[in-house]
Image: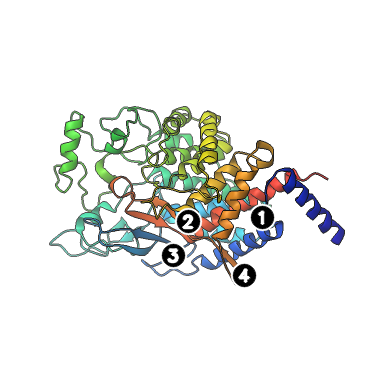
Amino acid sequence: MFRLIGLFSSLWMLLSVSLNAQPVAPDSIENALRGALRFIVEQQIRSTIPEHQYAGEWPSVMTMRTDFMLLGKPDDVYDSNCFSTASIHNSLASAFLKRPDLTEIPPMLEHAIIRMSDFYSDKGFNFWPLLPQNKPIYAFKPTDSSQLIRRPVRFPMFLPYIRKAANIVNDNDDTSQGYTALLLYTKVQKALGREVNFTLKLSPVFNTWRDSARDSQHYYNLIHFDKRESGAFLTWRAYEAPFPTWNVPRLLVNNALFLTPMSTLYPYPNTPYMPYGANDLDAVVNANVLSALAENNEQTAAGIPEASQFIHRKVKRNDWSRAGVYYPNRYHVHYATLRAWSKGIKELDASAEMIKKHLIETQFPDGSFHSRKIVNKEDILQSTAYALNALLRLGNPYKNGLSVHVEKALRYTFTRASFNRDQTCWDGGVFFSGGTVIRNTLYWKSDVYTTALMVESLVMYQQYIKESITF
């Protein structure tokens, strides 16, 4: 046994010297990984308290960075949403499929997948659950608690306008993450030797909502010079309110009157609402849809070339900070795009090469990556976690020349880890935002989300190390 350990250590040192890198010691990686799983197990909600928390999910917080008209003052408030639960589930499931000895993971997935069913309706998933009205929607009518609407569980919405606007329609972002979760959950069950079948062609689910034959364009896409009728996947799974004749002056007037029923931005009571009244295109949303299609072995589905081209236009223009309407972190587009590419979306080959170049060029000497100052004070840890995962998705770093960049990023994340008793945690950064005018004001963070992302990265890293050591 000791001879085997000595041989492994010798090979590890040889590997380090030959690659001019300083890997984190294998036992440190394994201890951090196991500690992270213990943290995620402990953080998963075990009991439901209606309109407060729900069994199977993990904590995330809605963060108001500054005062904002209609929304309120700076605050951090617990939130229940599909996106964070599905994303954590997917990182954990992906890790388990590479390391089936991580037996802590399947029980967590069981609870999470049950919770996620609460967000499903009409072949799609919603960001928020259906909950009773808890405050008046009308100025002079009492609250109707029998009426279910989509809304946050705890965030204080002081104005009827915001309560109506929170009742959002289903979206392709949560739908892609939700279906990916179902697909990965099925693969995990099969890996455990259980007979579970999930057969559903996803292309028709997403193909209905694409950027074609539209009488409108979202102002965010307009000001960022996005091509009209791109054929890429839209964010929202609903019909937008059409203009009689769409043009820029009409759009400007429409947006200026957003507080009045004369505007398509105006929300109505108990009516599912499309934010800002017009559908939009988001590069990260499109990458998430591509990942779901690839996970279901639909790499030739309709819409993939157009979505890939939409993403490539953002990448080619170095539009890293604004490529995602709902994703202000600069490196989320790197992570999401390479996640889709690594699953077999070959139309993203050119984007992958450009992203690789950008990752190499923008890494700081200490191994970290930085977003804009306005995004959670440069969101350094979250940016580095995304960049590390993206680097690993480019393939074995000991074969493609990225080992030094991976090692530096990994060492930096270890300097930012919290080791408490037998648990490991990485503080959460921005993983989602309110989009457009509030994309840098209202956003979501989760320590578990970031820690689960690191779990997935650590397992990928271990796999590459294992492949690189030959006896």
Q: Label 3 to label 1, Cα distance in Å? A: 37 Å
Q: Kindly identify which numbered label has been placed on residue 54.
A: 3
Q: Position of residue 123 (x, y in %)?
A: 42, 44
Q: Earlier in the sequence, mark 3 or mark 2?
A: 3
Circle 2 residue: 85
Q: Label 4 to label 1, Cα distance in Å? A: 19 Å
| Residue 1 seen in the current view | no
Q: Label 3 to label 4, Cα distance in Å? A: 26 Å
Residue 307 quadrant:
top left
Tell me the amino acid under the disc marked 2: Thr
Indicate which label's residue lies in the foreground, 4 or 1.
Answer: 1
Where 378 sits versus 42, above or below? above
Indicate which label's residue lies in the foreground, 2 or 1.
Answer: 1
Q: Earlier in the sequence, mark 4 or mark 1?
A: 1
Q: For mark 2, give the secondary structure.
A: helix
Q: Position of residue 444 (x, y in %)?
A: 39, 56
- Say if mark 3 contacts mark 2, CB within 8 Å: no
**Residue positioned most to the bottom:** 421
Which color mode does the image show?
rainbow
Tell me the amino acid under the disc marked 1: Val
Residues 301 and 66: in front is 66
Circle 1 residue: 24
Q: Quick one: quadrant of the C terminus?
A: top right
- Say if mark 2 contacts mark 1, CB within 8 Å: no
Circle 4 residue: 422
Q: Label 2 to label 1, Cα distance in Å? A: 29 Å
**Residue positioned most to the front:** 365
Residues 203 and 410: in front is 410
Q: Position of residue 118 (x, y in %)?
A: 42, 56
